[in-house]
Amino acid sequence: MGKGGMGEVWGATDTELMRRVAVKFISFPQTPTEREELVKRFDRECKLTARMDHPGVPALYDLGEETEGRFAHRRYLVMQLIEGREVDDLVAEHDPFPIGWAAAIAAQTCAVLSHAHSLQLVHRDLKPSNLMVDQHGAVKVLDFGLAAALDDDQRSRLTSTGQMVGTIAYMAPEQYDNNWSPRSDLYSLGTVLYEMLSRRCPFAGPTQASIMKARLTSDAVPVRELRRDVPPALERLLQALLDRDPRNRPESADEVYEHLEPHIGDLPWLPDAVRPGPTSVRRYTAIVGRALTTRVARPQSADKAPSRFAAPAENGRPSESFGRGDVDRARRHARRLVGEARYEEAARTMSRITERAERHFGADHTEVMELRRELAEVRFQAGDYRTAAEDFNALVRELSRSSAPDTELVLRLRFQEANSHALAGDTPRALNQLNDLLADERRMFGSDDSRVLELRRQVGLLQFGAGRTASAVHTLEDLLHDLVRLHGPEHGMVRKVRESLDRVKGR
């Protein structure tokens, strides 16, 4: 069905359930010595991606390795087979591509990205061929199987060996250095939207190097110079999405969605792609949308510039009802305050909304626990390390008591608690907690797991910061020996630890 740099996709039949599926065989171009570690990382990131329970993402059914035939020793994914048309094909067949459809496709993609980013997943390779429109007009975002986990302290990313993941023509500038964030996906979405409206990429060139240089040194031609019927507000949104500095892009996929929605007007029939008139799927989703969608804050007009939302009225008269929309508004406001380095105000906003949510939903509600985690992180950013440590500790205790605790989340919170104590000046307590955490991670993941190895490096650096130079040298030398054994002397992690060891020894 298709072939790319990371593998190839085949149509297949599930002989147990008698359904058509898509099977993607993954290529690992690294050397055999690196393959085992890459497989571990890939399997783990796929398990994280399997949390993507969203109608805009093909379901992931299975993960494994073929044992014989032409695909022997190849890892594979079994996914839901989507019948539809890729966006690049639709754009090629319709000149000009309807503005309403461009906005609708981008907005639906934002809805998927919002869900992914809430799970701390970044797509990293958003492009027209990874967006498929089915016969009902619904967008499916493909290739989330290669997404990166943001919430893993950068310990298990597929690109940790130095491989750059993504497609140059649609890649955010920061991805050239293997850095990414949710705003990297928004940049790629802006590139796709620009192409839908203008039928050309904002940055082009005969080679990958020339495209990268153009993106780093020049601005895209304003889209209204290429197509005069594009609304000015949509052009401003594109300019914000394509800003080279991630900090200047819209804050979230939710914000971009709100600015796209006013431009989704009349959606003309797309022959051979989208069926006209009512369908069973449209009737189903229309009822749910009208009845259950929580009212959210919207821009006052389609011409209002992006990233200009009014602050939520947290200090005014309390509303008679409270719901997810109130939580989302407060979150956006707090994130804007954090972006402006107004950390104490952000912490107060998060504290107020957390208290309201706890009264409304109950202390054990998933939304409340997530708000408490975000509040702890904001307090950490504000420099209130002792309070943040108390918050992280309380979350660890409560989550550990649950019937089915999220073990990896608990481990991450324990790391954040230890980091808070370190920054608060309580280094002995931080080291004790990190060593306890290291022992637990070794039992869970094995001594050679990348997360365990990275945590050992953190322990060594904290020992050095605490003035325990001899202990730090011992920790880092043992780690360096294990890394060379596992990966060879030229691996990126080996170089990083060697540099840390040189600093500790004062070289």
Image (tube, grey):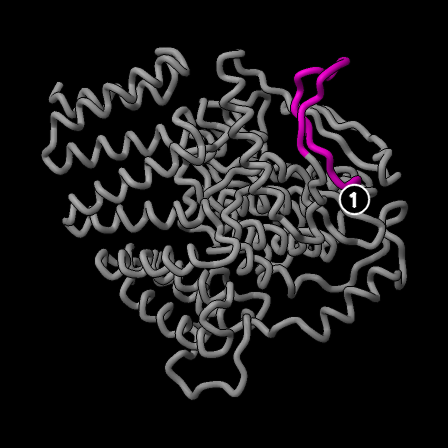
Residue 56 drawn at (x, y percent): 70, 51
In which quadrant of the rendered image does the N terminus lie?
A: top right
Residue 464 drawn at (x, y percent): 15, 32
Q: Return the residue nearer the eye: 425 or 16.
A: 16
Q: Residue at x 26, y 20 (%)?
A: 478
Part of the protein shown in magenta: 63-81
**Badge 1: few (under 14), some or many (20 or more) residues near its Cα, within 10 Å?**
few
Instruction: Answer with left or right where residue 9 lies relative to residue 121.
Output: right
Q: Residue at x 74, y 54 (%)?
A: 101
Q: Residue at x 63, y 59 (%)?
A: 231
Q: Is residue 226 magenta?
A: no
Position above or below: 378 against 82: below
Query: How many marks are shown on the rendered structure?
Result: 1
- Residue 136 appears in the rendering: yes
Q: Is residue 69 magenta?
A: yes
Position above or below: 140 against 399: above
Q: Secondary structure at mark 1?
A: loop
Q: Name the quadrant containing residue 342.
A: bottom left
Q: Kindly identify which residue carries mark 1.
A: 95
Q: Name the quadrant containing residue 500.
A: top left
Residue 359 drawn at (x, y percent): 45, 78
| Callout 1 amino acid | Asp
Q: Return the residue nearer the eye: 180 or 44.
A: 44
In which quadrant of the rendered image does the C terminus lie?
A: top left
Q: Residue at x 35, y 14 (%)?
A: 484
Residue 383 drawn at (x, y percent): 22, 56
Position above or below: 410 against 30: below
Instruction: Answer with left or right where residue 180 lies relative to residue 502.
Output: right
Q: Return the residue nearer the eye: 305 or 35.
A: 35
